[in-house]
Amino acid sequence: MQISYKEFLLLVDLVEQANQMPDDDLMSIKLTEEGYLYDGQLTEKSWNYLEAHKVDNAIILAAGYGSRFEPLSHYIPKGLIKIKGEVLIERIIRQLHEKGIQDIVVVTGYMADKFSYLQDKYAIEMIHNKDYMTCNNISSIYYARDYLKNSYILGCDNWYSENIFNKYEYDSYYSRMYSHDFVDEYCVELDYDDYILSIKKGSADSWYTVGEIYFSEFLSNQIRHNLDIEYGLSEVQKMIIDIYCQRHIDIYRFHTKERKRGIIYEFDTMEEAEQFDESFPMFVKEIMDNNQQ
């Protein structure tokens, strides 16, 4: 029996609180009746359930060129820029490590050799997306498809002010934020349980996707199967991940997590990076000077 999201969070809290909780809590009584708790402690059934929901790895997409960061992107991939003194992709890796997620795959394309130092520094695995110049980011998922399990799917250019990663995840999900104004982002329609009904580009008074995606192993198997069949189609190769998921939204089931403003930043332009980090222009100057000598 699938337990509810709140019940799942309670089990995770019990792990983090040394497996103890008051036995008069209404939810704990329900979980006890279902065999997940006994005398206020996690049972073997609980541990087996949590093990099935443990995050296996993270796949970081770092193949893109980053044209809106020209001329800086002529010399350095976007994932390797520094924001507030920390390399974007290294900050993500550090935050994953803090939550015990050591198995990390980086999908490269543009300037792939620039990322090679990460293999020695963090023991990451690198995959090369040979289609990065002609296809959209669904191609990176295609080349990483054999690594898809219980997997975070991450852009290399996001900056998380808080560590949003977890050792366990309940279900496949997107993070979401709300905007009253029109946003040129991938907006989602949700059902009563905050699962995605549809995804479309651009809307007002809408939730929109932001930051990380999480694929459960069940969903990963579905996506791998479909990509093996469909990747040769030109319309599929041109898709970003969100639109590919919309293509199969009748079978791809995504929960959503609301994120407050100030948690996830994505820098689409040099100007946005400068507004966020006053030291960024000095980083740009250093890169440009070093490459013009």
Image (tube, rainbow, N blue to C red):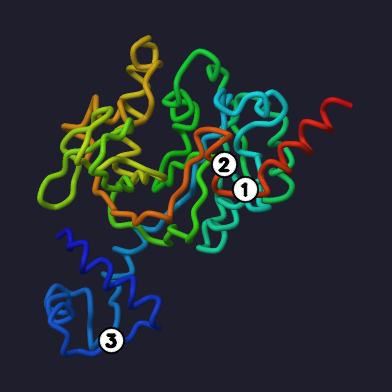
SS at badge 2: helix
Give the distance between the C-alpha atoms of the residues marked 1 and 2, in whole angstroms: 7 Å
Point 60% across, 25% down: residue: 109
Q: To which residue does mark 1 refer?
A: 83
Q: To which residue does mark 3 refer?
A: 21
SS at badge 1: strand
In the figure, is residue 22 to the left or right of 57?
A: left
Q: To which residue does mark 2 refer?
A: 273
Q: On screen, 38 above or below 112? A: below
Name the front one of labels 2 and 3: 2
The answer to whether mark 1 and mark 3 are in CB contact below 8 A is no
SS at badge 3: loop
The answer to whether mark 2 and mark 3 are in CB contact below 8 A is no
The answer to whether mark 1 and mark 2 are in CB contact below 8 A is yes
Identified by mark 3, the residue type is: Met
Q: Quadrant of the N terminus?
A: bottom left
> Which badge, 2 or 3, comes first in the chain's sequence?
3
Give the distance between the C-alpha atoms of the residues marked 1 and 3, in whole angstroms: 41 Å
Give the distance between the C-alpha atoms of the residues marked 2 and 3, in whole angstroms: 45 Å
In the figure, is residue 157 to the left or right of 189?
A: right
x and y, in percent, of residue 221 in the image: 33, 36
